[in-house]
Amino acid sequence: MMNNTVDVRGLTVVRGGRTVLRDLSLGLAGGVTGLLGPSGCGKTTLMRCLVGVQRLQGGSVRVLGEEAGGPALRHRIGYVTQAASVYDDLTVAENLRFFARVLGVDPGRADTVLDQVDLADHRDRVVGRLSGGQRSRASLAVALLGSPDLLVLDEPTVGLDPVLRRDLWRLFHELADAGTAVLVSSHVMDEAERCDRLLLMREGAILADDTPDAIRQRTGSQDIETAFLRIVEEVAA
Amino acid sequence: MNPRVLLAVSARVLAQLRRDHRTLAMLLVVPCLLMSLLWWMFDGLPGGMFDRLGPALLAIFPFIIMFLVTSVTTLRERSSGTLERLLAMPMAKLDFLGGYALAFALVAAVQSALAVGLCVLVLDLDVVGPVWLLGVVAVADAVLGTALGLLVSAFARTEFQAVQFMPVVVIPQILLCGLFVPRDALPDVLGALSDVLPLSYAVDAMQELTRSSDTGAVWSDLAVVAGVALAGLALGAATLRRRTA
């Protein structure tokens, strides 16, 4: 199989009595992959499986050649949850210093990642006083500290202004060009165009898995939103 | 285990406390105020009640306070997603728990130095044994509270539930530790129960220090408290799951 970064087979996950993912299979290679679908469709659960913090009911998830969540992978995956997982009562710099020590990376990495997410001006501000967008960028900075081989980002651009959004997508592509596989989830369809590859997800299943161009062509649609609707109708028919 | 990570967790917990002036002030001042209150209550009364109750309370306060602070903080860490992020990083579970225990032990050391100092120097609490050993028992007690707080936070889904564990885990220990009825005067069943509750040993150690200069019994009580605290941390590590449903 050419997709060797992530290899998911027959994945089934039940959360709170509800089957969130049913017999899902998927391969991921490098580049920027967008995981698109309405909220509640299982994007977060799938991402939790890749990171290895989700209990599985069936199937296997292998990441970078290892069982997801294995100790050797913990150095190699960066994970940004939907809620900014940083300490609100510490400054941005204190947060980064702490996570850098946990990861065992050079404290100087903090300056690099702050520049990457454009937060250098706010380094000495307490996270709880930052705006939502700034907090989620602080959380992203933490995920970049360890120079991960796989970056899993759960809705990282929610609530950001268009300029910042564009800058972040540019950053995702820079990271991908440097060899990091980037998986970004979003429920905003217009972000789809910025991805090298798209996974369209609905009700726990992957409906389409291709480049944005190929998905539009196959469905004869102008944009991904229409393509998504046509695919949903195809599946229902 | 990795000392670098454990110390990083401790330093972070202390940095968070340093920012939270009100919590820090309450952690340090409230035990002193309560001990003063106790002293004042019995000031004009005969019977040396302050000397009888004071040592037990010096053991109980750090235990309760650290239990509460820890169970709420860890739950906050769980709900903010930082715990999940840490568990997805190269961090041993014992580094996380040990980091918390070390940080709160340091706070408890300052807290009990103040409370013990106040009791001995200002409120004239009679201590026959070495005064510093009172501080050591108080710190062991705080670590015990931290360990049990970490353990129960694994079974609480909300901060409401975590706080409700206090009456379940802490109050029976206070009732049976010898504060209200001497432990050897308890009914047999309750006496046996008292013998397996760790706070009883902490209170015994404190009371022994005010009565005798022989520290042998104190050290063996202290060993029981420390042993249960370590067992609590180990059990906490076992119940902390990297993968959740």
Image (spheres, coloured by chain):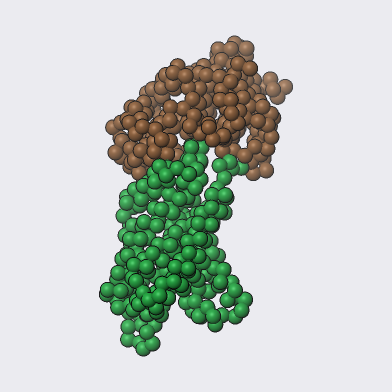
Toward which corner of the image does residue A100 lie, by quadrant?
A: top left
Horizontal side of B215 relative to B244 (left or right) equals: left
Question: Residue A11: x, y in percent?
Answer: 66, 31
Q: Is residue B82 above or below residue A119?
A: below
Name the residue: 34% across, 48% down: B15
Question: Which of these two is toward me, B213 or A92?
Answer: B213
Labels in figure, total: 0
Quadrant including the N terminus of chain A: top right
**Residue lying furthest right:** A237
Q: Which chain is brown in the picture? A: A
Q: Is residue A71 above or below residue B66?
A: above
Question: Residue B85: x, y in percent?
Answer: 48, 39
Name the residue: 31% across, 55% down: B21
**Residue lying furthest left:** B122
Q: Is residue A110 visible?
A: no
Question: Which of these two is toward me, A123 or A43?
Answer: A123
Toward which corner of the image does residue B60 lie, by quadrant?
A: bottom left
Q: Is residue B121 visible?
A: yes
Drawn colour of chain B? green
Toward which corner of the image does residue A13 lie, by quadrant?
A: top right
Name the residue: 41% across, 66% down: B137
Q: Is residue A35 above or below residue B238?
A: above
Name the residue: 40% across, 62% down: B139
Question: Residue A228: x, y in percent?
Answer: 60, 21
Quadrant including the C terminus of chain A: top right
Question: Residue A194: x, y in percent?
Answer: 48, 18
